Amino acid sequence: MKSLSLLTLGWFALQAHAAPDVDTEQLRGEAASLIPPFQQQLLGTVKQAMADGGPAEAVKACRLLAPEIASQHSQAPWKVGRTALKLRNPDNAPDTWERSVLEQFAKRSAAGEPIEQLKHGEIVAGEYRYMQAIGTAEACLGCHGEKIKPELVELIDRHYPQDQARGFREGDVRGAFTLSRALPR
Ligand code: HEC
């Protein structure tokens, strides 16, 4: 009887999506600490490809290596990725929760909040989820800006016929890092 009531309690805690002893501050810190190495490897890979073979090689590196780098950095229990409202790779499409956070970031950015502050963590359906906005730097404009070289446009169109991830300006929110993990027991 006793174990049954404990089970029931556990069930209610799950239903509330917030076990009382989950330390969301710690999870938030963990999530945030996984982003810089992921971001640095992405940037380093693009820079290297650019140096080795120019912009076309860099597009290829993004295309082939970005998903692989994301899975390399997804070390259990965390899953790490990137998403955006205006997408290049449809595999990065936001789910409902991610979309609402991206929309919230867009509003906060339009209201003048600096991109570095656009972060949001929350317990959603038994997972801890965390997102952090990605700004558009000058280095991104060659492939996501308003004036992309014709040969790159051709290449991008070929691989991403539905590409929407162009026309950005420096300082725009380009997208966000998105992380999730099952709640610790
Ligand atoms: C050499 C071209 C190139 C450069 C430079 C580049 N990107 Fe990308 N970007 C791509 C390609 C190709 C993809 C699709 C690859 C993928 O992630 O699947 C992509 C995908 C993304 C995504 C994932 C969401 C989506 O639309 O699929 C984000 C976010 C992103 N880029 C941000 C940036 C930022 C920020 C910079 C500058 C720091 C940058 N990119 C520089 C080519 C580039």
Image: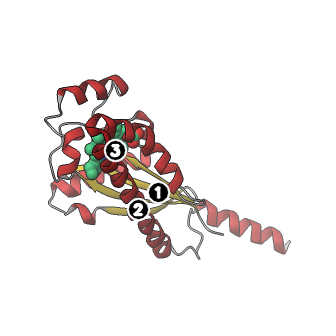
Kindly state the secondary structure of the residue where label 1 is placed.
Answer: strand
Kindly state the secondary structure of the residue where label 3 is placed.
Answer: helix
Quote the CA–CA distance across marks 2 and 3. Answer: 21 Å
Question: Three-letter amino acid code at disc 2?
Answer: Ile
Mark 3, residue position: 49
Residue 109 sits in quarter:
bottom left
Which label sits in the foreground, 2 or 3?
3
Whether ligand 1 has any atom under 8 Å from the Cβ at mark 3 is answered as: yes
Kindly state the secondary structure of the residue where label 2 is placed.
Answer: helix
Left or right of residue 1: residue 156 = left
Identify the residue at horizontal 34%, vertical 44% (top origin): 49
The relative height of residue 82 versus residue 9 in the rendered view (above or below) is above
Residue 50 position in % (x across, y down) = 29, 44
Mark 1, residue position: 179
Find out whether the residues at labels 2 and 1 contact each other: C-beta distance under 8 Å: yes
Mark 2, Cα crowd under 10 Å, few <14 / some 14-19 / many 20+, is some
Q: Earlier in the sequence, mark 1 or mark 3?
A: 3
- Which is nearer the eye, 2 or 19? 19
Question: Three-letter amino acid code at disc 3?
Answer: Ala
Which label sits in the foreground, 1 or 3?
3
Find out whether the residues at labels 2 and 3 contact each other: C-beta distance under 8 Å: no
Which label sits in the foreground, 2 or 1?
2
Q: Earlier in the sequence, mark 2 or mark 3?
A: 2
Residue 94 sits in quarter:
top left
Q: Residue furthest right?
A: 1
- Which is nearer the eye, 69 or 83? 69
Question: Three-letter amino acid code at disc 1?
Answer: Leu
Mark 2, residue position: 35
Quote the CA–CA distance across marks 1 and 3. Answer: 26 Å
